[in-house]
Image (cartoon, rainbow, N blue to C red):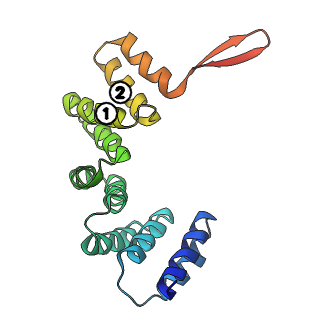
Amino acid sequence: MTNLENSLNESLSLLREKKYKEALEILKKIEIEDSRVFFLLGTIYSVMKNINLGEEYLIKASKLDNKNSAIFNNLANLMVIKGDLNSAKKNYLTAIEIDQNVDSMSEVANIYLNENNLDDAKKYLNMALKKKPEHKKSNFSLGNLYLKLNEHKKGLKYIKKATGFIRFKDTGFEIIK
């Protein structure tokens, strides 16, 4: 394994342990321009709420690797935080184009849902659920979409699939799946 690979693996391990500053120290020492390094730097800065640096490194990563949907999904997440929903949609759609990223489908659908563009929201939620039927966020969002359409029975079916329902009993409660 190369020094680059060792450094990437070590920083990933620290990232999983939420030791962000230690991971950053390792990544900043890497002098090679590598999309994986920039992706990790962008992701860590994003988690640490340094949105501008997160964006800067994710853009660098996307220029070196335009076939990694996670880069575009994370960049889109930052754009949502910044309130730039047009850029967020563009990046989510790029991630979907690359590899049918289910999280991106669900997120772009939520933007459409908030814009009251129910047709596009429904399209992407159905795409997500076709690929991953148990995706909780997509089920929940599709349930809310149907509630907006006054299709309560259908809406509750999807919300139940996402969350379950609670039935209270004398001895406590149970989750109904």
Look at 49% across and 62% down and name the residue there. 47
Cβ–Cβ below 8 Å for labels 1 and 2? yes
Check disc 2 and report the residue beneath it: 142
Give the x, y percent position of residue 59: 29, 70
Between the residue at mark 1 and the residue at mark 2, the CA separation in whole angstroms equals 6 Å
- Could you tell me which quadrant the C terminus lies in? top right
Query: What kind of element bears circle 1?
Result: helix
Point out which mark residue 156 bears.
none
Q: Is 64 situated left or right of 81 in this image? A: left
Residue at the location (27% across, 36% down)? 124
**Percent x, y for residue 28?**
47, 85
Q: Residue at coordinates 23% horizontally, 32% vertically from top-left? A: 123
Residue 91 position in % (x across, y down): 25, 56
Tell me: residue 92, above or below residue 156. below
The residue that mark 1 highlights is 125
Task: Indicate the quadrant where residue 135 lies.
Answer: top left
Name the amino acid type tagged 2. Leu
Near-viewer residue (91 or 117) = 91
**Number of marks in the rendered image:** 2
Whichever of callouts 1 and 2 sits on the residue coming sooner in the sequence is 1
* Image x and y of residue 82, in percent: 33, 57
Q: Residue furthest right?
A: 171
Front one among 20 and 93: 93
